Amino acid sequence: MTQKLNTGSHDLPVSDALAEFMNTGWADTHRDDLAALPQAAYTAKRRAALAARFPGERLVVPSGTLKARSNDSDYRFRTHSAFAYLTGDQEPDDVLVVEPSGEAVLFLRPRSVRSAPGQAGQEFYRDRRYGEFWVGRRPDLAEAEALYQIACAPIDRLDDVLGGPARVLRGVDASVDGRVAPGDGDEELETFLSEMRLIKDDWEIAELQFAVDATTRGFEDVVRALPAALGHRRGERYLEGIFGLRSRLEGNAVGYDSIVASGANACVLHWIRNDGRLNENELLLLDAGVETDHLYTADITRTLPLSGRFDPVRRQVYELVYEAQEAAIAVLRPGASFRDFHGAAMRVIAEGLRDWGVLKISADEAMEPDSGLYRRYTLCSSGHMLGMDVHDCARARAEVYLDGVLEEGQVLTVEPGLYLQPDDLTLPPELRGIGVRVEDDLVITADGARLMSGGLPRHPDEIEKWMQC
């Protein structure tokens, strides 16, 4: 069945003569020199592990679809992480099928045939969503097999293999969801696809280290740009653009919307408006990460004095958060409960708030499950798994993630913070409107944890020295 062309209302008509002319005179651009993607050996092992977990069953994992931003303009496509993890493919509308035999086939949209009659021969120059003249070249079937090291078939043959029961990763591609009746096993498939990413292989750890190193360079770019940003009416957005440039130069994009929050904006946990002016008497909270070309992201936060030096009050707040992070990092090791590092950080925070006179009860009382009063000033968790998603493995069961234990090869963030709201009357006036978070990325090793983001200073003295360079 020929798909309808995605054309715009203002596109110029195509005469029969032009259509005939466009179907002739094109060189063969098929490539035989393509090397396999660097992760291809790993994706094969991952597919084998998936097939072994559900033996004798058909498994369907779509890449995702294009989504309209407005009218006929699409968002930049970003494939589903589980699909990319299993294939390395980043094209829209592709579908991975693991057969009951364990054989895997990647169904994809082939390149349009430029000599085909009718609409099939017009896609390459008339279709705004898929035409190569509009969005660029995609691999043909043989090229895709070379790149991804997997058997490939045209997407229009997908119905041939979806005639029976199957587990489907749902909510990713509505057309795939509609081809297979929902089953009780779909949720189990989604859970396993999340849990199998909890422990990173060597290739993934190297990819994440690249993301962290590129993010470090992005933070250095931001510090160098501070003088110009301080003079701009939208200084936050100026710095967002500076970091965004680094992310596009070295990777695919930012791994999530950058948080560039000055002054009281830093008390908003996910401030992404980034439209504020910078004030040299305030702090800047920068939470950003470069996503690599293979879709692994860093996630780092630094809180910087815009003047280059902390005043006494802001240093006091920063030092408490820094000490909380130090306590959290110290407990990271295989076998430790995932929740242990958060508890260690919050103990330091609660004790500090008590010492300041902000908490009117003891730290022990505040830490009790039926209290938690310290959370008014810190609120959220102190870290999460990191990988292809900034909040990676989010569909994993609690017993193997949040209530589980740390294992060698896991990569996570440690990010305690204090968010002292500007309208909080329980705080002394000098503390109101100060937000501080310190976040780093770590990999669990055989005997502890390695700080992947150690290239960026954390201690306030080191930050001041760094900013003067």
Image (cartoon, rainbow, N blue to C red):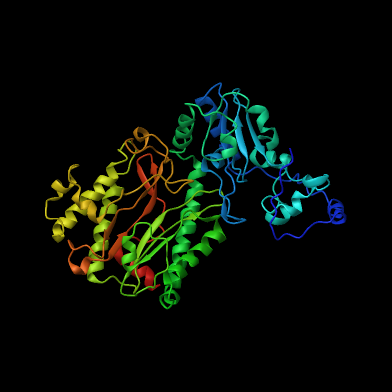
Q: Give the side of residue 191 with respect to residue 60, left or right.
A: left
Picture quadrant where residue 149 is located: top right
Say above or below: 203 vs 254: above
Closer to the camera, 251 or 12?
A: 12
The reply to whether residue 113 is visible in this rendering is no
Q: Nearer the viewer, residue 337 or 469?
A: 337
Left or right for 34, reference 337 = right
Observer-nearest of 346 and 263 = 263
Relative image position of residue 404 (x, y in whole percent): 33, 35
The answer to whether residue 248 shows anywhere in this view is yes
- Image coords of residue 382 (percent x, y): 31, 49
Residue positioned most to the front: 9
Q: Is residue 208 left or right of residue 72?
A: left
Question: Taking 187 as reference, is 113 above or below it?
Answer: below
Quadrant of image for the C terminus: bottom left
Q: Residue 394 placed where, x, y %?
A: 42, 41
Residue for point 56% across, 42% down: 84
Viewer-closest of 5 and 147:
5
458 relative to 432 in the view: left or right: right
Residue placed farthest to the left in the image?
361
Q: Residue lying at the far bottom in this picture: please name it.
A: 231
Q: What x and y, as percent, mark residue 139?
A: 70, 45
